[in-house]
Amino acid sequence: MSPLTFTLVVLIALVCGMASVLDERQFHRPLVACTLMGLVLGDLQTGIILGGSLELIALGWMNVGAAMAPDAALASTIATIVVIEGNQSIGEGIALAVPLAAAGQVLTIFVRTITVFFQHQADRYAQEANFRGIEFMHFSGLLLQGLRVAIPTAAVAAVAGTHIVQSWLDAIPDVITSGLQVAGGFIVVVGYAMVINMMKARSLMPFFFLGFVLAAFIPDFNLVGLGIIGACLAVVYVQLNPAFHDAIVAPAPATAGTPSSDLDNELE
Amino acid sequence: MTNENTQNPPAQGNEKNTAELTQRDYMSTYVRSTFLLGSFNFERMQAIGFAVSMIPAIKRFYTTKEDRAAALSRHLEFFNTQPWMASPIIGVTAAMERQKSRGEEGIDAAAITNVKVGLMGPLAGVGDPIFWGTARPVLAALGASIALSGSILGPLLFFFGLTIIRAVTRWYGFKIGYEKGVAIVSEVGGNTLRRLTQMASIVGLFVMGSLVSKWTSIKVPLELSRYTNQQGEEVVTTVQGILDSLLPGMLALLLTFACMWLLRKKVNAIWIIFGMFAVGILGYWAGILAP
């Protein structure tokens, strides 16, 4: 790996680490992170395919409330380096990504605990009306989150191309790698389960079964087709749902009722 | 409360009373809000990020050091919501700070904090199903299915699709929150948002259901019987064959329910995944499961 490539790899890892806590621009999602890594490592194609495979697994991983998801950022950056620089298969990349996601989660918990001190320092700056101080605390926390991905990634990038690592990876017995591939086929459901649980909508579960049965018996439907069916069902359900019939239910004050019911009619 | 001009005591010719956020303040608040979770910590979560997002408004509305310090401290209190839905809250809070700086009745520090805290939960309840439950998984599923063929279109579709949704939510969320002010609180509980949330949940659940069947592969090639029939053909009955004739993807469906149950029991997702790895390795080793 040339010094330029190495620098770019570390920079991308830094951005992914920051994105992982921000959950804003989605650079930490495998689909984006692996693609960028593939781009700088000179094998865009492999990066995209690995990103797609990992994204399937990480599909429902999300931070909701105080609960934290496995860390997709560290998993994506290191798995891409190992697959491309270490000449490993996509399947092995996936197998490696999951322990890395766990490690990444531990690291982010560590940083999120350290930033409690930043919080207290920010309190002190607030009393002096020190805007710069608070901003400095905020972005220092962000930088730490970036470094917690950038440093491990740099370490792996430094050794990934060497023979020792390759022979070590090649020494993993077939029953493990194939077994992990088997598991790769169904660990995706963990993400789906996370999404379904988060929705907290027991009464809407028939739509889940409807989607399942339609896709199971008519495999010709692709995702766009299924998405359109889902959207149509959603609109019809909400239109027919008596809970939303303002004219009958709404016990709102008479004055406030008129403009809001006008607004609602537009959606119907 | 929205009609400031008539409610204000007319004889208070103070200069700061007319301060409004400028276009630059809007832009600055928007950019700052995109870093909301930067210093996420376990004590007060998004608190510093919220204070940092409020800085343009605090600078605009308050001139004395004491007022600014008080406002900063006020916004360093616990805050946590769906990141993109924080923008309307920042907008409402900025509007209330403006009212407070003008000395309007009924708007004090406690009122601002109450509205802020009151909006966190309901807006997260709207944002989580819409963005994390539907928009992102659906775009990710679509993007990933394209990416698996090696096309750059997959990542691009995912990235730009979400970027547009995010930017629109943040920009207009803040704008509407700031312009409507406290009036928005009654709308959060209203039917429009509930409707939107429910529609998103339906699409999300429907697509999750189809993904369970489409993208989960559990193969059980275990043979139950093998015999040669009267035509001289060999007939093999496998577990997979029987399951498929009942309901294709049945095992995946059962596994999904098992996961939901475990997650509800507060089992960390990563342990479930490791458990599945163990099942995969043991199953392959015993010849029950195949890739």
Image (spheres, coloured by chain):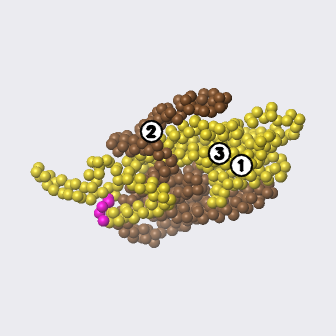
Residue at mark 3: chain:
B
Residue at numbered disc 2: A230
The residues bearing labels 3 and 1 have C-alpha atoms spaced at a distance of 10 Å
Q: Chain of mark 2?
A: A
Point out residue B221 in the picture as x, y percentages from the top left corner. Answer: 28, 57
Q: Mark 1 packing: few (<14 Cα in 10 Å), some, or many (20+)?
A: some
Residue nearest the viewer, comparing B73 with A76? B73
- For label 3, the residue is B119
Quarter in which the C terminus of chain B is drawn: bottom left
The residue drawn where x is 84% and y is 49% is B64
Mark 3 crowd level (few <14, some 14–19, many ≥20, 10 Å Cα): many
The three-letter amino acid code for the residue at tag 1 is Thr
Q: Of residues A165 and A177, which is closer to you in this image?
A: A177
Q: Is residue B25 visible?
A: no
In the drawing, does residue B127 fall left or right of residue B93? left
In this rendering, the answer to whether B287 lies above or below B64 is below
At horizontal 60% and vertical 65% (from top left) the residue drawn is A110
**Which of these two is toward me, A46 or A16?**
A16
Residue A53 in picture, x, y percent from top left = 44, 53
The magenta-colored residue range is: B286-290
Q: Which chain is brown?
A: A
Q: What secondary structure prevails in the magenta region?
A: loop
Q: Nearer the viewer, mark 1 or mark 2?
A: 1
- The amino acid type of the residue labelled 2 equals Gly
How many residues crowd mark 2 within 10 Å: few (<14), some (14–19), many (20+)? Answer: many
Residue B135 seen anywhere in this rendered image of the structure: yes
Chain drawn yellow in the picture: B
